[in-house]
Image: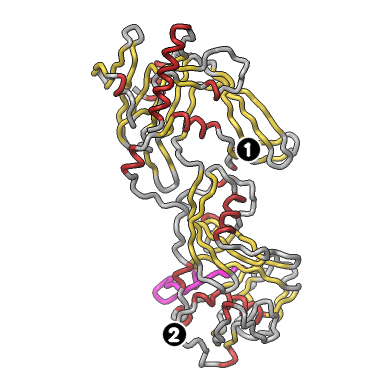
Amino acid sequence: MSMERMIWWLYDGQWDGQYKSTLVCPVCNKVSVTFDPFMYLSLPLQFATTRSMTITIFTCDGSALPSTCTITVPKQGRYRDLIQAVSNACSLKQTEEIKLVEACSIRNHLIHRFLDDSFVSLSTIKDDDHLAAYKIQKSAKGNVLLQLIHRRQEQETSDAQRWKPFGTPLVSSLSCDDVIRSGVIQTIVQTMLTPLLKEGIEYSDDSDPSTSGMARDPSDHGSGEVDTNCASTSINKVLPKLPLQLVDESKTCIDLSTGDEKAINLSAMSHVVVYLDWKSKLLEKYNINYLENLPEVFKYGPITKKARTEPLSLYTCLEAFLREEPLVPEDMWYCPQCKEQRQASKKLDLWRLPEVLVIHLKRFSYSRSMKHKVETFVNFPIHDFDLTNYVADKRSSRSQLYELYALTNHYGGMGSGHYTAHIKLLDENKWYNFDDSHISPINEEDVKSAAAYVLFYRRAKSDTSGTSSAGSRRARDKTSYKH
């Protein structure tokens, strides 16, 4: 029997559960409250309220190699939480800022979008994504972003080669007027790449002394002076003139490898794109491994024995379900006050509970690259499931205690599985196991297992005789949650 048919059979049409749904606009704080009926609750199996994310940090001042760090953010957080966590991890200065990108925004190894909207939910970043953070000088009036795109030669046909983009772009803040000299861009790019220089190699270009230059402070627009305090120039190295090409507003490539005084007009450009062609001799002088193979945001490992057996309270699952969280971008809310689509915060409350309460445990997890079943054992009450504190309508005089009378189990994985059911015959006050055509009695203590998938509760009768016994059973159940 399918899960849907099992729900209908055991639920028997008790349609009087009701949500209170509250939406808050993140811009104008407009509040919208609606009430909606529900048939069953679908609860997440989550222990933690935080999430670990791995990100690669790039500096633009030549002070450090690209490095990865793992930070902790709120599970239901937003981009601003991630930016703040990365800023703390890399000891961001007041004069600096963080620019974030994810792999899906880097198409053909060119950044098309930064993660600048601080209100977007972190749930849009999947575990199998790749993140990069650029530590740059804060934007000021007249500043533009310089994006360095890497290219190398690849064999296209037996007798032809072409330059093809590769690796992760590098980003720097470019402080300039309407016109900038090509030598300044050369210096900025050389500074960005300084940490990648290999040790023990002579960097001077012996073929033509005029085609090499000293690494200097990128803020020096051609003065020729070297900032000896800069980490990238602590050792005076004569660096090779790099084969750079700048793409102007008309999509024309300007060669920056010759002539330091060539004037580049940036007045009509919102950002600067520069291509660096990594010729074979140049590849010998730099370690470009840092530009490739960014780590995943989170890499799944095998499920440990502890994770499979450590109990999770059903109350914890319910609290995770009722926690306020931002809507996903695909489900934006039209704010009647802003007259715009907004990523509002949504809060669900249980306004009214049905006579028969069905709870679905979300054991199946999906991402773009994998699917898996959560085998966590959920410790759910059989008697006295007390929802008094979770019902928002405090005017109700109805009992909010529930008794379990049936559940379905799922055995197996994603591709195939088997359903069984445990059902209590109320007239006999006995539990039975239903496994296809086989029916057998089962002890109440054996009803709970890590296979529990859908739980069926009925409202307990509030009579005087049941009050004392309910209290003792509740104390017993709450004690069991501590272990």
Dot label at residue 345: 1
Q: Where is residue 119 in the image (x, y as percent from the top left)?
A: 64, 46
- Density class for disc 1 (Cα within 10 Å; few <14, some 14-19, many ≥20) is many
Spatial separation of the CA atoms under disc 2 and disc 1? 56 Å
Q: Which amino acid does label 2 sit on?
A: Gly
Mark 2 or mark 1: name the one nearer the start of the chain: 2
In the picture, measured across the screen, residue 67 lies left or right of residue 93, that is left
Instruction: Tell me the residue at 72%/35% (across/down).
Output: 30
Q: What residue type is labelled 1?
A: Ser
> Magenta stretch: residue 149 in it?
yes
Q: What element carries label 2?
A: loop
- Density class for disc 2 (Cα within 10 Å; few <14, some 14-19, many ≥20) is few
Frontmost residue, 66 versus 465? 465
Q: Position of residue 95 (x, y in %)?
A: 68, 65
- Magenta-drawn segment: 147-164
Q: In this view, does 122 lie above or below 278?
A: above
Question: In terms of image quadrants, where is residue 432?
Answer: top left
Name the residue carrying label 2: 200
Instruction: Tell me the residue at 57%/52% (across/down).
Output: 82
Q: Is residue 8 something one can see in this rendering?
A: no
Instruction: Tell me the residue at 48%/21% (across/down).
Output: 386
The C terminus is located in which quarter?
top left
Q: In this view, does 37 lie above or below 273?
A: above
In the picture, measured across the screen, residue 395 lies left or right of residue 155, that is right
Q: Where is residue 237 in the image (x, y as percent from the top left)?
A: 54, 86
Q: Position of residue 158 (x, y in %)?
A: 39, 74
The N terminus is located in which quarter?
top left
Q: In this view, does 373 lie above or below 292?
A: above
